[in-house]
Amino acid sequence: MSDQPQRRRGAETSQRRIRSASSLRLCASASKTRSRFSQRSVVEPLGYPHHRLRFLLIVAIAIALLSPMSIRGTVTKRKILYVTHSAGFKHSVLPLSQQILKEIGDRSGLFEVTSTEDLSAITDEGLKPYAAIVFYTTGELPITDEQKNALMDFIKSGKAFIGIHSATDTFYKWAEYGEMIGGYFDQHPWHQEVAVKVEDRKHPATRHLGQSFKITDEIYQFKQWDRGKVHVLLSLDVNSVDLTKPNVHRTDKDFALAWCREYGRGRVFYTALGHRTEVWKDERFQQMLIGALRWATRS
Ligand SMILES: [Zn+2]
C-alpha cells in the first residue's frame, strides 16, 4: 500500500502551519508596535486596560508556540532502517558506520536511524514504519521468499532503498535484487587514492562535490551493470588508476561509484564508496548520504 495520501496530508498540514506562522509573523511585527505602545501606556496616569494586556499575553504565547523554531520541532523525522548483516565478509567499519549514520540523521533533523543485523524486520508489517531501508551487507542474507517479496514491495510502493559499498556484494542468487540495485560487485582492483568524476552536479547527493575530487578507498568494479539502466552520479577517473591490473575485467573501462534509479514507484541510490573508516568520517561522504536519503525519501 502507498503512503502517498498520508504524506500529502502531512505536507498540507505543514503548509497550513507555515501559512499560519507567516500570518503570525505579520502579527508579531504588529504586536511589537503594540508592545512599544503599551510600554509607553503603562506610565500613563490612566494605566492600561487589563483585557488588552491579556490579549497581548495570548498573542505572545501564540507567537512563541508557532515560531519557526517550534515548527521545526514538530517535523516528524523519517524512520530509516540500517541493515548491516554480513552473511559473507564482515567490514570492520560497520560499528562506526552505524554511529555516524545515526549522528548525521539526527544532525539533519530529518531522519531517525535504527541499525540492526537482525533481518526479522524485513516483512510487510515490520517495514511499514520506515521511509527507507539502507543496506551495508554481504552474501546471501538468510531471509525467506516472503521477506524478499516484502522488501521489493516496500521499494516498489514508493519507499527508498540505499545501498552502501558491499550492498552489491549481496544476494548474487536473487536476480531481482541485482536488477533493483543495478549490478553486482566484481572484485576491487584498486585500494588507493583515486580521482572521482562528478557526473551529476545537480543531484542532492552529489551537488556539493564540485566537478571532481580525490578520495582514498577500496574501489569496486561491477558486473551485470550497464550505465543505460541507471543514472550515474559518480564515476572513476580511469587516468588515476592502473587499468592493466589482471583483475580489471570491464572492457568498456566504465567504473561507476554512485548511481541512482527509480524502481517501481520507489527510489534507489547506491554508492560503492564506504569501505574505510576515513571515508565515513569524511564530511563529503556524510553529506552525500544525507543528500541521497533526502532525494530517495523525497524529504
Ligand atoms: Zn570493502
Image (spheres, helix red, strand yellow):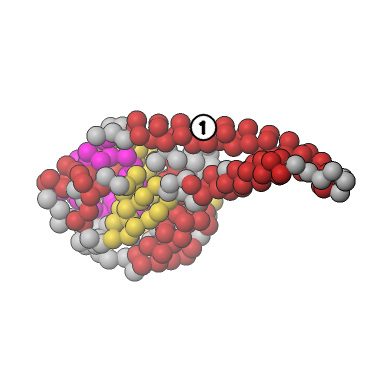
| Mark 1: secondary structure | helix
Seen as rendered, the residue at the extreme front is: 46
Q: Which image quarter holds the C terminus?
A: top left
Is 99 situated left or right of 69 in this image?
Answer: left
Depth check, front residue: 97 or 54: 54
Would residue 156 be counted in the magenta stretch?
A: yes
* Residue 155 position (above or below residue 283): above
Is 174 situated left or right of 292 in this image?
Answer: left
* Residue 54 position (above or below residue 187): above
Would residue 169 be counted in the magenta stretch?
A: yes
- Quarter holding residue 252: top left
Amino acid type at circle 1 is: Arg
Badge 1 residue CB within 8 Å of ligand 1: no
For the record, the magenta segment spans 152-179
Residue 233: percent from the left, percent from the top? 44, 41
Determine the residue positioned at 32% across, 47% down: 130
